[in-house]
Amino acid sequence: MQQERIERDGRADFDFLIGRWNVHHRRLRERLKGSTAWEEFVGTSIARPLLGGLGNIDENIMERASGRLEGVSMRLYNPLSRQWSIYWADNVSLVLQPPMIGGFAQGRGEFYDQELFEGRAIFCRFIWSDITETACRWEQAFSADGGISWETNWIMEFTRQE
């Protein structure tokens, strides 16, 4: 008897994020320049489901020394490709950014895109990890050498609000 391969449906991968969060941010002051100076600030995030569970949206407020940053993430799951697309817009760029594409395996989410940074093409990576009922971690990294090396430039530690 031939054993069927059962593919995992990832539409619930971001269910952990639904709700209200306090967020501690660490953001590298200069990116892809060898900097080790970090800016730290706090924020909040509120996430809710969309499209019957095939997506979600979150609103983010970040209290930086340079002023308040407001942003929104929208995540959409494609059941055919079994991949997520993550879109971002904020009150500084006022543009819906091209999506990060990826998915989850063994409790860790990895998402990638190629974008322009200071006039040159780079790779960008998001990682979601350390996911529990009350906490999770997100980090962003850039690669200017085609993914050989990565510089983590933004880390967010989420703690669920009571």
Image: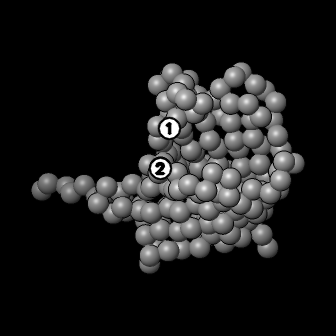
Dot 1: element: strand
Quarter of the image where one finds residue 132: bottom right
x%, y% of residue 28?
75, 35
Amino acid of disc 1 = Glu
Would you say 51 lies left or right of 162 here? left
Which residue is at a point 77% across and 34% down the rendered structure image?
A: 29
| Distance between mark 1 and mark 2 Cα atoms | 8 Å
The N terminus, quarter of image: bottom left
The residue to which callout 1 is attached is 115
Residue lying farthest to the bottom in this orientation: 52
Which residue is at a point 54% across and 48% down the rendered structure image?
A: 108
Q: Contact (CB < 8 A) between labels 1 and 2?
A: yes
Would you say 3 lies left or right of 41 here? left
Amino acid of disc 2 = Pro
The residue to which callout 2 is attached is 98
Quarter of the image where one finds residue 131: bottom right
Would you say 30 lies left or right of 18 here? right
Residue lying farthest to the left in this orientation: 1
Which mark is first along the chain, 2 or 1?
A: 2
x%, y% of residue 123?
50, 33
- Residue 2, relative to residue 54: is it above or below? above
Asked whether 53 or 43 is in front, the reply is: 43
Which residue is at a point 56% across and 55% down the rendered structure image?
A: 95
Crowding near the residue tagged with mark 1, few <14, some 14–19, many ≥20 C-alpha atoms within 10 Å = some
Q: Is residue 135 visible from the viewing direction of this image?
A: no
Crowding near the residue tagged with mark 2, few <14, some 14–19, many ≥20 C-alpha atoms within 10 Å = some
